[in-house]
Amino acid sequence: MKETAEGRAAGAVAAAPSPYGDAELYDLVLGGYRDDLDFWLSAARSARGAALEIGCGTGRVLLHCLQAGVDMDGLDLHPSMLERLKRKAAELGLKPRVLLGDMRDFTMPRRYALVLIPCNGFVHNLTTGDQLKTLRVCREHLEPGGALVLHTFNPSFAEMARPDGERVLELEAPHPVTGLPIRLYDTRRKDRVNQLQFSVNEVEELDAQGNVLRVRRNETTMRWVYQAEMELLLEVAGFARWRIAGDFDGRPLGRDDNAMVVTAWRE
Amino acid sequence: MDALEKSHYVTPDLYDLVYSGYVEDLDFYVAAAKAARGAVLELGCGTGRVLLPTLQAGVDIDGVDVRPEMLEALKRKAAALGLKPRVYPGDMRDFTTPRRYALITIPFRAFMHNLTTEDQLKTLRVIREHLDSGGALVFNVFHPSFDRLAQGEGEPYLEKEFRHPGTGLPVRMFVTPHRDRVNQLLRCETEVQELDGAGRVAATHRYEFTLRWTYKAEMELLLHVAGWPRWRILGGFDGRTLEKDTDEMVVTAWKD
């Protein structure tokens, strides 16, 4: 791609804290998300070889798959996330091979039958140039016949038309230790032309009476991708064929789906 | 393009009734044609709304349109002006003209008649083949406005009201939009009402057409895949930066 598409954006990362700098908070909020675990385990089991998870974080998916006997490595950009992953792995008697690295430019010592990017990991690529770098380096890490599978959000019209600055209760879950409520609020702003979503996240920990005991804030920027755009990206990055589904059940992407599950084959 | 069978392009009189009053892009396309260092080709020239004023400005401009009826109307209008334009029937995805051009234009969102990625790429490739070295493609399409897309699915709205160019009586155009978010398609059921002096509907015309919208990053990927080495995407005919989703995407792409 031309320079303007390659360059920008990485520098747009906010000075405010990233949610990935606080691994304990990350687990507090997302540790309970299990909707995708069956899908990833099944994909890894049916792969004819080792798997690599990009953006493995604290191991929500990776440890689940390792425990089921799958040969899976991991890559993540954030040292604190990998430290926490390793501690959790040690408690389980596991020794995963995880590397610190950027999904746009990494090198693993082996090749894989499956590379997976779960849970919106791909939307951290904020430009076309970054998206292409990531897709290309993932493809290079695939064995012949291997596939890349990624899960990313795909905003509906209703989500796109939501006014900027609206504070939305994104999820409410029990604290994994105390059982007390945790609430995640997301205040979003969108750059509709550049497909960027800027989120201010607030994680509230409540007591039994519903009083807010603690609030932690962080910020994220994500770039969503459209279906036709994703197909062009895959083509430019050298993938030979692909399938884009609207959910883990494999149904074609439909008008009300808010996610894309992309499978792209190396050849 | 099968979708055109039911379309307004088969009846040039109706087309001219509804669209001949649109002049917002004329200065832009005439100026671009005058600045070109060689001949110009307009794709989707229709009945000559842009092509004839460009010819009158002294530019060497040819035209291509998929509808012979539209070209016949163009030729009649040209003859009345003492002009003899070179226009060819042809599909923008697969056309051949005898010469090459310094500039190829696709005004008035006609690129949006390419309803698939494959058609978009065919069009962009065949255009590039028809350019001289150093030549450029210029076209405009709308950037999707999400506030509009998210509202009024299947509900008619008044798109515009204007005076009949012949009689001066009011004409109303209603559009009922249907969107396919995943395939980026907008199908417009259109009803044009000609009113009489008392405000009663004297005649009604119905037609429909389908457009495919394109996002900015997607457009850049399309240009890249079709072999264009560089381009610029602006947000309006006035040269502003594309910032809002309600802006018009004005694309310039260079052959080399």
Image (cartoon, helix red, strand yellow):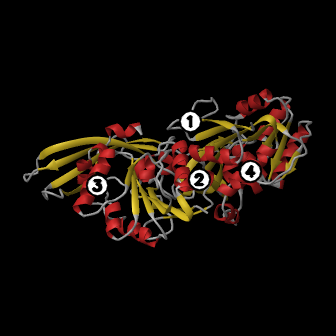
* Same chain letter for marks 1 and 3: no
Q: Nearer the viewer, residue B236 or A246?
A: B236
In terms of sequence position, does the residue under pointer 4 or pointer 1 come before the other? 4
* Same chain letter for marks 3 and 4: no
Disc sitting over residue A186 in the figure: 2
Q: Write down the chain letter for disc 4.
A: A
Percent coordinates x, y for residue B63 in the rendering: 39, 56
Residue located farthest toward the front when viewing the structure as drawn: B98
Q: Nearer the viewer, residue A110 or A69?
A: A110
Q: Write down the chain letter for disc 3.
A: B
Residue located farthest toward the left when viewing the structure as drawn: B198
Disc sitting over residue A134 in the figure: 4
Would you say A81 lies left or right of B183 here? right
Residue shown at the point (84%, 49%) measured from the top left = A82
Q: Write down the chain letter for disc 2.
A: A
- Alpha-carbon span between mark 4 and mark 2: 27 Å
Point out the frontmost of discs 2 and 3: 3
- Alpha-carbon span between mark 1 and mark 2: 25 Å
Q: Amino acid at mark 2?
A: Asp
